[in-house]
Amino acid sequence: MESTPQQTDQKHITNLTGFLKDVLRLAIFAVERGNLPEDIHMDELYRMWDTKIIQKHALSDDDVAYLQKCYLILGRQLAPTTAISLRATECKNARSSKDYMNTDAGRHVRNMWFASFIALAMIILMNFYQYIFEFNASTWVTEDPSLFSKATYLYSLIITLIPFMYGAFGASVFLLRQAETQLRERTFDPRRLPEFRNRLVLGTLSGGVIVLLYSSGGIVETNVKITEAALGFIGGYSIDLLFALLDRVVNALKPEAPDTTSTPVNRTPAFSRPQNRAKSTPSEQTVKEEKETAPQLVPVTTREGDSVG
């Protein structure tokens, strides 16, 4: 179904209205920070607001060109804050703190709260089960071997999974810390939400894998002594640590490539006597040595008769 000219004009008006609102958001934020560019005049923007939003009149081509100019200038001036990040952290009815939690940024922070508390609760439960098993293992093995066997399997599974829980907890703490900065500077971009979720998954895997590498002796001992739990948390908080360790392991496993750029060693002496040259006789050698020897100065001694009285 083809759109009519009226529908096209209405869509253009709606898009232009949103564009005007974005420019005003950026300009007001620049005024709040005290760095509004001199080329941008708030009275012109408010005049366009009154013409477009209140009076429902169309803007002229010069007004649209001025809006585009303002948007480009403000985008460069306020980066990394954008109109999208301002919308994501903006609350229409800020009557209470709950209203701010209904924004895109507030929902992201709330989700990270849930992820952090769930990971922390799982860690506490797993540690509690480890304590119960280690305290009662000697009793279960004699009184109820079947229960001891099942508990041992569960204990082994928990030992394997707990580093991943520490990694998830570290990744969620990192995202919360990052969100705190983004909320303060109003740079939260909802288009990066898939990146944040992927970071949470990578942190969970990093925490478990880095502990496995540490347990297998793949990490060189350092002066800093940390437990496996702390190592899993650090691996989830900073996934760059895992990638650096993986690069070291891969480089250590790579076979050394032969050096094809080195030149072959010449085993012949640097200076060789020509073969067709006749050997000199001892007399000739003596003459040559006498000619090549530098003359020596002999001190002159005066005779007694030659002395001046």
Image (cartoon, helix red, strand yellow):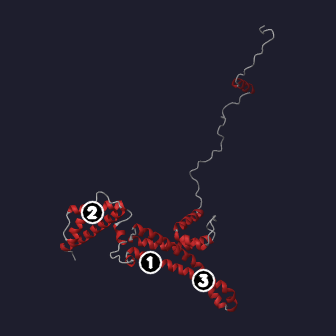
Name the residue at 45% across, 70% down: 180
Question: Residue visible at 52% across and 68% down?
Answer: 239
Q: Label 1, on which residue?
A: 111
Q: What residue type is labelled 1?
A: Asn
Q: Which label belongs to residue 244?
A: none
The single residue placed furthest to the right in the displayed view is: 304
Mark 3 or 2 closer to N-term?
2
Image quadrant in which the N terminus is located: bottom left
Q: Tag on residue 128?
A: 3
**Label 1, residues with CA under 10 Å away: few <14, some 14-19, many ≥20:** few
Distance CA(mark 3)–CA(mark 2): 61 Å
Closer to the observer: label 3 or label 2? 2
Label 1 close to label 2 by CB (< 8 Å): no
Please, what is the three-letter code of the amino acid marked with disc 2? Met
Marked residue nearer the N-terminal end (1 or 2)? 2
- Residue under pointer 2: 42
Residue 80, image quadrant: bottom left
Q: Residue at the far front: name it.
A: 95
